[in-house]
Image (cartoon, rainbow, N blue to C red):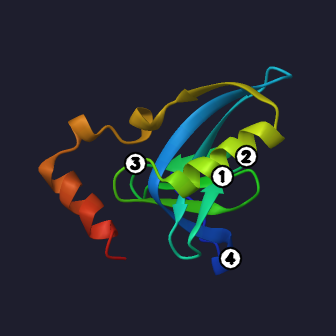
Amino acid sequence: MQLNEIQDDRNQISLRRWRVMEVTTQDGTCTRHAWGHDATNNQGRASSAIIEFSLDTMTAKTRSGTLYKLVGLPGNSRIGQSAWVKWCRDNGVVAELDVTGEYLDINKVSTLGFKKITRSLNQ
């Protein structure tokens, strides 16, 4: 799936030590969201609902129009997790499931794929 180029850099965020979560809200709505460490701005981020995802570029476009680049390997950023906990509390989340492995399963990444992922850390 290809994503359109976003012209405004403010709408692009690179997340390191990221996770993807599926949530259910009080009204029964299920959505998926990315969270992690926004290294550019040195803050935790939690996205709005993911509407498109590109495995080739490891980018997720969200309902708000923001493009999140998932950089490097998944992880657990304390600052990102704090943003996620707040987002869940503010949005009435009643259940959550970690679905990160559906986006990048480290056990299934080839050597070439692993090199591509680690190169993304230098961008």
Measuring 39% from the left and 34% from the top, which residue is drawn there?
Answer: 101
Q: Secondary structure at mark 4?
A: helix
Which mark is drawn over residue 83? 1
> Marks 3/1: CA distance?
15 Å
Name the kind of residue labelled 4 in the image: Arg
Name the kind of residue labelled 3 in the image: Gly
Left or right of 9? Residue 91 is right
Q: Residues within 10 Å of mark 2 (few under 14, many from 20)?
A: few
Name the kind of residue labelled 1 in the image: Ala
Q: Residues within 10 Å of mark 1 (few under 14, many from 20)?
A: some
> Marks 4/2: CA distance?
22 Å
Near-viewer residue (9 or 90)? 90
Near-viewer residue (52 or 81)? 81
Which mark is drawn over residue 75? 3
Mark with earlier residue (3, 2): 3
Give the tally of numbered discs.
4
Q: Secondary structure at mark 1?
A: helix
Mark with earlier residue (3, 1): 3
